[in-house]
Image (tube, rainbow, N blue to C red):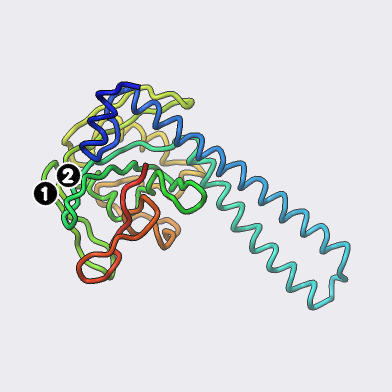
Amino acid sequence: MDKRSTSEEQKSGYLGLTRADEERHLADVISVAQQNLERAGADIRKVNEDLADLLETYDVKDKEGLALWNNATARLKENEYDLIRYEKARKKPYFGRIDFKDGISQEEETCYIGRARIAKNGSEPVVLDWRAPIASVYYESSMGPCTYTVSSEGTYEMDLVRKRTYEIEQDVLKDFFDSDVVANDELLTKYLAKNKKGGIGRDHCDNPEGAECHHPPLAADERHHSGRGGFRKNDRGNAPHILHFV
């Protein structure tokens, strides 16, 4: 590891910026995404086994058996939806990154942004869903002071210092670049064009510049800026977002 790069990263608070840093980070995220995908597959197999057991144990008219069957099929549907999200995340872990200084704490933070949330151990986000409020600055803001809004909570300030776009193919970091372009980076446009059609892309907005998006709701913690695993409260005692992730 480049000692100077590591030292600068620790000093600045942002994650590493070199190609080697980015390749290591990609490998870490891919590992988490693969674990999530395997776990989702195992969950589906377990529910199918439970359904098979129910068929053998209960008569089709048994009320208790019917209630257990309905619960199991609901879990199966949820697990199948999770599998689709995890497959999407595994194929394309992320496409963007923002580095910024928090407007309240002045801490320097990094967020990676993808088409689907990726979380370690189910609760430690390493990639944010592109629909998370804080991700809006990647599409809509230029470098410098800017804001994002969390529904029913308010508007939060930051100093945006970097927007980076990635091209990842077959688990390989093909290219990345920094820019100060609002919503229409070349690689981002190409990325959206590739993924706006088809089943697993159905929750991705075809037009990030303002067209209405139709997608399932975010998880509760995904409505905020998420990261290190615990909510950071502001001066009013609220919890507008979570710290950045490693």
Residue 47 x, y percent position in the rendering:
71, 56
- Write down the residue under mark 1: 145
Q: Residue at x 26, y 68 (%)?
A: 153
- Write down the residue under mark 2: 160
Q: Residue at x 31, y 38 (%)?
A: 96
- Disc 1 residue crowd, few under 14, some 14–19, many 20+, Cα 10 Å: some
Looking at the picture, tell me which residue is in the foreground, 108 or 220.
108
Looking at the picture, tell me which residue is in the foreground, 33 or 65.
33
Residue 214 x, y percent position in the rendering:
40, 56
Q: Secondary structure at mark 2?
A: strand
**233 w.r.t. 134: above or below:** below
Q: Are marks 2 and 1 in contact (CB under 8 Å)?
A: yes
Based on the displayed image, in which of its 4 quarters is residue 156 positioned? bottom left
**179 w.r.t. 125: above or below:** above
Q: Report the side of 189 relative to 11 (left or right).
A: right
Q: Which part of the image, by quadrant, shows the N terminus?
A: top left
The three-letter amino acid code for the residue at tag 2 is Leu
Based on the displayed image, in which of its 4 quarters is residue 213 positioned? bottom left
- Outermost residue, left side: 144
Residue 123 x, y percent position in the rendering:
47, 54
Based on the displayed image, in which of its 4 quarters is residue 235 positioned? bottom left
Looking at the picture, tell me which residue is in the foreground, 109 or 64.
109
The three-letter amino acid code for the residue at tag 1 is Pro
- Residues at marks 2 and 1, CA–CA distance in whole angstroms: 6 Å
Residue 218 x, y percent position in the rendering:
42, 58
Q: Which part of the image, by quadrant, shows the C terminus?
A: top left
Q: Report the side of 74 relative to 61 (left or right).
A: left
Q: Residue at x 46, y 44 (%)?
A: 201
Q: Report the side of 49 relative to 159 (left or right).
A: right
- Outermost residue, bottom side: 63
Q: Earlier in the sequence, mark 2 or mark 1?
A: 1
Q: Secondary structure at mark 1?
A: strand
